[in-house]
Image: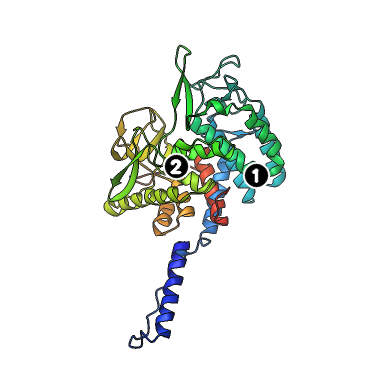
Amino acid sequence: MELLRSTHKFAFVTLTLLLTAGCLDNVGPVAPEPDPDPRVTNPHADQALFLEAARAAWQYADSQYQPTTGLINSVHDYKYATVWDIASGLSAMYCANRLGLLPRTEYDARMSRALKTLETMPLFDGAVFSKNYRTPTAAIAGRDDRDVSSSERGTGWSATDVGRLLVWLRIIAEKQPQYAPEISRIVARLDLGRVVADGYLWGTDVDAAGAVRRYREGRLGYEQYAARGFELWGYPAPRALSLSENTFPIEVLGVPLLADRRGDEHLTSEPFILAGLEVGWNAEMRALSERVLKVQEERFKRTGQMTMVSEDHVPVAPWYFYYYSINHHGQQFVVNVQGSDVDLNDPRWISAKAAFAWHALLPGGYTRNAVDAVAAARTERGWSSGVYENGRKSTGSENINTAAVILQAALYSRTGLPLID
């Protein structure tokens, strides 16, 4: 938008100077330009749309809130949450309060309860939050969603998930300093030096025999976003933050992009929209983010298929959680699953959270049409992850991550600023 305004201003000044100098004496009256679409040029034109979307998003988060812990179910009536989901729960409450959807007294009670849970819930090896928890009890859960006893370690930690949680703990601590003491104690519990080493982020996993495997975690987009969380708490991972360290140039549908030379990347909207909404883009990240959106519009231009890709809960067996990737293993616009080399043709969907987030960050005619395209994703329980490309039927999988991002997009659209600078 700033570029558009600056361009118009430059054109006006140039025309004025030329007229003053007599250089355009023989030019007739300039025909007025048609009024631009206010949905494209006015970032506040869709405020009512965003607020109504946020109300529906909060409906899900409110109904799935667990008062005993302050955590929110990851998927409707599914009483588990990863650390990523827990961060999304904090995000949903924070944004709902800022948007006037959650009154201050109730917000304080819920946020205080959630932070108290994070102060006391068990850690993997007493060092870092484990991968998965039960939302009613905050007990560690295993891969198969069965509780493990407090004497067991869990299944390791995800550096990417912890990075997202650290972003949100910093946002809340800085914007609402009354919570800073509790949040400082939460972060102090974590041995982040075990996660950040040699400039990278490291995750852990536990095999069936109980052996711990340590691995360098993160790929293009996700790695940079997660590293921002650690950086905000004084644990910089410069090699993980770098967009050039492990990438090489590619072209998809004529749009220049990057691929991860280590392979196994999921080049999709998710980390770029989160970075833009929450911590802001630097120049490099903004340029790549703009091209990530542009290539999705290019697919629409070539195929007529509205395209908004991301990671999402989609109720299709056997995985139920899929990445719709612009590039994965050298294949373009494929659906895949983390840890799998199989590229799928289905399910293909238009992501609701991606549509709203891109429209908040880089509003234009395409993003506005994308928001219209996902209208059927709104259900009586909130927002499902999106609509299927074929038929535009709702995926029917309401979840905290979709709700959180739509709430964030609504708040961003109101302020025009990332949630933390």
Q: CA distance from mark 1 to mark 2?
A: 24 Å
User: Dot 2 surroundings within 10 Å: few (below 14), some, or many (20 or more)?
Assistant: many
Is 420 displayed left or right of 217 in the figure?
right
Can you give x and y, in whole percent of width and height, for residue 28 in the image? Answer: 34, 86
Q: Residue at x 69, y 43 (%)?
A: 177
User: Dot 1 surroundings within 10 Å: few (below 14), some, or many (20 or more)?
Assistant: few
Is 276 displayed left or right of 102 in the figure?
left
Residue situated in front as seen by the camera: 266 or 80: 266
Residue named by callout 1: 174
Can you give x and y, in whole percent of width and height, for residue 142 in the image? Answer: 51, 20
Q: Residue at x 69, y 36 (%)?
A: 112
Is residue 60 positioned above or below 24 on the image? above
Total labels drawn: 2
Q: The residue under label 1 is which amino acid type?
A: Glu
Q: Secondary structure at mark 2?
A: helix
Q: Of tags 1 and 2, which is closer to the observer?
A: 1
Quadrant in the picture for residue 91: top right
Determine the residue located farthest toward the front in the rendered image.
198
Q: The residue under label 2 is which amino acid type?
A: Glu
Determine whether label 1 and label 2 are within 8 Å by CB.
Answer: no
Quadrant in the picture for residue 137: top right
Can you give x and y, in whole percent of width and height, for residue 47 in the image? Answer: 54, 58
Residue situated in front as seen by the camera: 136 or 180: 180
Whether residue 152 is visible, yes or no, is yes
Colour convention = rainbow
Residue named by callout 2: 270
